[in-house]
Amino acid sequence: MRRFWLALALFLAAPTGPLSAQRLYKLEVGAAAGYHVFSSKLELGNTFGAAIRAGYWFSSPFSVEAEATFAKPKTDTPLKRSVSTTSISILGLGNFPIGKTSTFFIKGGLGRTSYGSCPSVSVSGAGPCGNSSTLQTGAGVRLTLKPTIFLRYEALLSRSLRVTHENLRLRD
């Protein structure tokens, strides 16, 4: 996890010139903090996490974005084990103006959530492991602070489509 934070800090601190898409206001790149709430079936407590995303505006009101989220919740079992969760997704967005400079958006797409590798011996209460394909949907607002700086608030819901590892354990 330290490597992730170091890589993120270096990425954000790296001096770069504007890309041609940024000059046209079509490229959106950002980092975010968020509060992750997990289903009780996963036996994971809620926690803060981080996200990075890159998006491209094709034409008003349509855009697409790739997003990666990271969180490290603890199990809500007596073990209180930390589980590294990561999610990678591709989403389509519908953007609708609010006033002159801000937008409301709805989004939906597909993703993949990982709960880390599974141990060779299963331990009751250790939390989930393995991967799951997800269907994601959400909505939010993008508030303009400066012509190229936005503050974004959103809610995102992920629903597992298919479990891709037999050891992804869920509570009944």
Image (cartoon, rainbow, N blue to C red):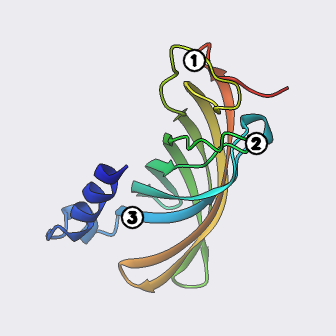
> What residue would you read off at disc 3?
30
Residue at 80 percent across and 28 percent down: it is 171
Image quarter for residue 94?
bottom right
Residue type marked 3: Gly
- In this rendering, would 162 be left or right of 83? right
Q: Position of residue 151 (x, y in %)?
A: 50, 77
Depicted 118 relative to depicted 113: above or below:
above
Q: Quadrant of the C terminus?
A: top right
Task: Tell me if mark 3 has few (under 14), some (14-19) or many (20+) residues whose alpha carbon lies within 10 angstroms of its own.
Answer: some
Q: Viewed as shown, does residue 124 lie left or right of 49?
A: right
Q: Nearer the viewer, mark 1 or mark 3?
A: 1
Q: Position of residue 14 (x, y in %)?
A: 17, 67
Q: Report the mark closest to the observer, 2 or 3.
A: 2
Give the structural element (helix, strand or loop) at label 3. Answer: strand
What amino acid is labelled 1 in the image?
Thr
Q: Are marks 1 and 3 in contact (CB under 8 Å)?
A: no
> Residue 40, relative to residue 70: is it above or below?
above
Q: Which residue is mark 1?
A: 164
**Whole-percent x, y for residue 133 in the image:** 58, 28
How dense is the environment of label 2, judged by Cα within 10 Å: few (below 14), some, or many (20 and up)?
A: few
Question: Gap between marks 2 and 1, in whole Å?
Answer: 18 Å
Q: Nearer the viewer, residue 150 or 120?
A: 120
Element under disc 2: loop
Residue 162 placement: quadrant = top right
- The Cα–Cα distance between marks 2 and 3, rounded to whole angstroms, is 27 Å
